[in-house]
Image (tube, grey):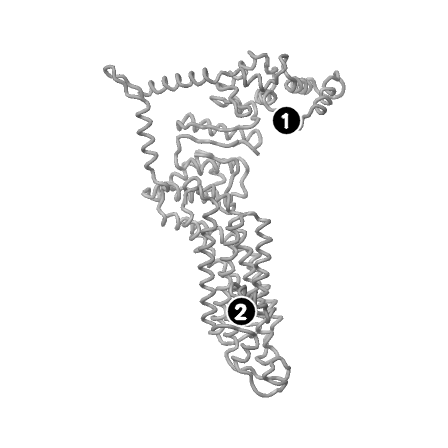
Amino acid sequence: AYVKQSDLFFDHLTVRDQLTYTAFLRLPSDWPKARKVAEVDRIIAQLRLTKCAETPIFMISGGEKKRVNIGTELLTDPSIILLDEPTSGLDSTSAVALMRILHALAKEEGKTIITSIHQPSSAVFFGFDKLMLLADGNVVYFGTPRGSLEHVKKLGLECPAGYNAADHHMDLLVVDSAMDEDGEKSINDIFQEDDVGTASSHSEMNLRHRRKSDMTTGSGITTKQKLIDSWDNEASATHIEEETAKDAAEFGLLQSVGGSSRSLRGKLSRQQSIVMTEKSFNSTWWTQYKVLVHRSMKNSRSAIFTMLNLIKAGAIGFMCGLLWFQMPYTESTVFDRSSYYFFTMTFWVFDAMFTAYMTFPLERAIIFKERSSGAYQLSAYFLAKTTSEAPARLVLPSIYMVISYWMSGVNNNFVIFLGSTCCSLLSVLAGESIGLFMGAAILDMERGMVVMTIITLALMVVGGFFVQNVPSWMLWMGYLSPFKYSYNSSVQLVFDKPVPCDGSGVLSVCNNGSTGYASEQEVLDFLGVEFSAGLNAGLLLVMFIVVRIMAFFALKSKKAEERM
């Protein structure tokens, strides 16, 4: 298992939720649910997460987040655990507590724990069984932490009493590029001053020691180079091989019977063949899909169904209802009715586009992290995301339509209300697909936002409301616009009977008269509507499906080296 330095989770999930979803995804499918839940409970108890098990992850401390991160990898019971700077960002107490847990895993569970660590405290430093020091890609020491002090002492680089051993090694091995010759000289001048000021003798000793470590040795080479040159890699490798052979013999991996030996290589080959025949994913595609749908719905509930979003949908619906309040069905309100629908489509399609665009850039790191550990297939994730979030995203526009439609009196026929609402929701789904595609194709947030703004405004302008006479060489853009199809279909549904003339002069067929009627087709021709309502709705559905498939392949291409 590999535990990354950054703790990446869906913050709205609780600690137990995170571990439970991981268990259902990564533990074998033939395990019963009770066994997986029991494994989650064991990990929570083992990592001392019981008190925060039901707390959302965004509310727990840094040390607890790190333990949750480790717990997600421990669920599969790995023999070897690699951790990238597990104590980074933690205070000294939390760091020591974490290292004690890791130490217990190594001693009690028989796991091999390997960590990279940067400038640990003394308690953490001496808690390791083995220590490897690296400098410029070279091994300069491998052995016990206390043995490292003996090693540098033999080279005349003894650590002063009371000084942090880890800091001492860092002083010897790390050279800051910001320390140029002039800077080093000025600092040396400071160190040459005698006991003046309020600095304590211990602090002064540390400063003098740092000055000493920055200087070259008497032979003219740096302390780092001296440590690199003095370490014998061949002798160390031979010693490790001898220890390995000794340990293998003790555990019976090397057995001599009648002069014949059973080689360790044969044992390892057998183990390797077992690993190579393992499945890429422990759970089936259907299991992955069900678990991811459940998780995504819980995330959607936290992100979409917030009180602010519900108030927003209701307030905008009420405001629009007041602006278009109880429009009479006459010639003078033809534009008002069409503008109501174009505003509705524009607002909610924009909202869906930009909200969906943020999905993949924000979740990218989590997706790649989980997939790199073999948690699920990309197709299962993508379809679960579509299944769970698409219906949830339709709730807010539906609230808006219920309020604004009846207040504005667009058309009091309930069937027309259902039809126009469905067209509006289809446009929202189509806009969401476009946002998902752009977010998958352009993972850079800043660049993607610029491209999204240009494309969405272009599609809106050619949607048929603002510009009636679009240049011939730009007409093709209108047929890629969800605004056009949703506007056309809804307007056709609303004008379901002849419009009375009222002398306002809006429709030329009325000839400024207050008598007579304009037919439905004459009104639609005046508004520049194309195709039937059913065809426009069908094209929205096609756009929703096709662009979403394009989004899947765009996302898949971003991580071709991972398991798909």
**Front residue of this view, candidates 79 and 266:** 266
* Residue 437, label in figure: none
Find residue 473 and report its image quarter.
bottom right
Amino acid carrying mark 2 in the image:
Tyr
Find residue 27 and report its image quarter.
top left
Q: Gap between marks 1 and 2, in whole Å?
A: 63 Å
* Residue 176, label in figure: 1
Q: Quadrant of the N terminus?
A: top left
Residues packed near mark 2 inside 10 Å, few (<14), some (14 to 19) or many (20 plus) = many
- Give the vertical position of 367 relative to 113 (above or below): below
**Farthest residue toward the right?**
196
Query: Residue 307, how many percent across, how many down?
Result: 56, 56
Q: Disc 2 marks which residue?
A: 487
Amino acid carrying mark 1 in the image:
Asp
- Give the vertical position of 139 relative to 3 (above or below): above
Query: Residue 478, how many percent across, how many down?
Result: 54, 66
Whichever of callouts 1 and 2 sits on the residue coming sooner in the sequence is 1
- Give the vertical position of 516 relative to 10 (above or below): below
Secondary structure at badge 1 equals loop
